[in-house]
Image (cartoon, rainbow, N blue to C red):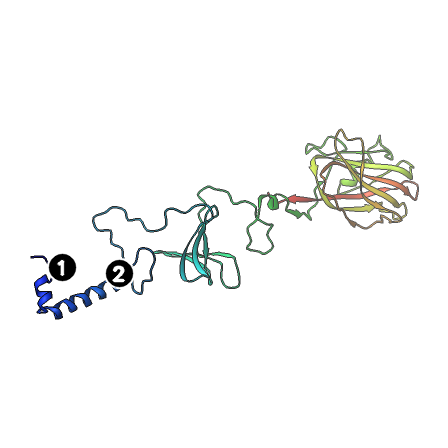
Amino acid sequence: MSVNIFGSSIRDRLLGSNRTYVDKKFAILSTNLATKIDKSGDTVSGDLNIELNENNVRTFGVSDIGVGKSVSLLLGNTDNQIRHNFGYPIKIAATCGTKFTCPAGDVCRLGGQTSAKAKFLTSIGMNDNFISNLHDPSAGQDAATKKYVDTRYVLNNVGFVPDLLSNNTDKRGFIVTASSEKNSNENTFSAYKAFSSSGEWCTDGVRNNFWIQLQCPTRIRIHKVALRGKHSGTERIYDWKLQGNNINDSVWHDLHIATNTYIGNTINFFNISTSVEYRNYRIFVVNAEGDNPGLSYCQLYTIDTLV
């Protein structure tokens, strides 16, 4: 006996003895079909759970994206989605930003409604990798680049030159010379006296175009110089230059030019602006007054690196 898909025999159908049963089965089938998802596209109104069962891998997603195509997983609306346009990086869009968390706590937050900044909520371990292209710091807690640290300096206000005892026999590497010294044979007014705690240096009757020079043990960069004239206060230097150069450099570079600026018998400080380190420094006097002008004090103040 033939039986149709609804489970009723032809004879029963013809006799009409099971019409109610057939109608019921048809209604159940229609209801069941209405709850199924159409593989060509449909809307799910409930939770969708995919079980792994006995399989080791379950694949979920789009596997045939190509040129000119996009894949988007909406998370509420188009402002919150994970999107991939073929050939471009995957884009995560989130109205209130994206937060990464783990069982140990929050890791970081990327962006927000009013800012695109990334905010890390725990320490970062760089695993021995570099951080590059940083800006120079502006706030106290900003990270500093190597270049920034290497070019930071401290203005040292402790004099660089120690108390010298001779022109050229100092074991610390300082050598003092002058174009003119009064009583040079007697060592009374020798050039080193300008860098000594006692005495003074003066010329042997020279009032124009004379100099005193200090060679340092190493190159230094200075930010100021302190000078004091002779104790008498009447033999004064008033047109002068502070100059610098290095060994094998025949040119003296002007670091400070003073015109009609007297170096009196009290200590005066003069600020110097230079980015160059020199080993040799000298005071070149253009004009002075008195019989034997000179200096009773000279000191250099360095700019020191942080390292």
Secondary element at image label 1: loop
Q: Residue 210: image x %, image y %?
A: 87, 37
Q: Residue 105: image x %, image y %?
A: 38, 57
Q: Is residue 45 left or right of residue 29?
A: right
Question: In which quadrant will I find the C terminus?
Answer: top right
Label 1 sits on what residue type?
A: Asn
Residue positioned 73% across, 30% down in the render: 169
Q: Mark 2 Cα within 10 Å, few/some/many (few <14, many 20+)?
A: few
Secondary element at image label 2: loop
Is 305 above or below relative to 248? below
Q: Is residue 294 left or right of residue 118?
A: right
Q: Is residue 243 left or right of residue 98?
A: right
Q: Which sits in the foreground, 59 or 31?
A: 31
Q: Residue 217: image x %, image y %?
A: 69, 34
Residue positioned 76% across, 40% down in the render: 195
Q: Is residue 122 visible?
A: no
Q: Nearer the viewer, mark 1 or mark 2?
A: 1
Q: Earlier in the sequence, mark 1 or mark 2?
A: 1
The residue furthest left is 1
Displayed quadrant of residue 208:
top right
Find disc 1 in the rendering and name its residue: 4
Q: Is residue 4 left or right of residue 90?
A: left
Q: Is residue 140 visible?
A: yes
Is 119 above or below relative to 219? below
Find disc 2 in the rendering and name its residue: 36
Label 2 sits on what residue type?
A: Lys
Residue positioned 24% across, 51% down in the render: 52
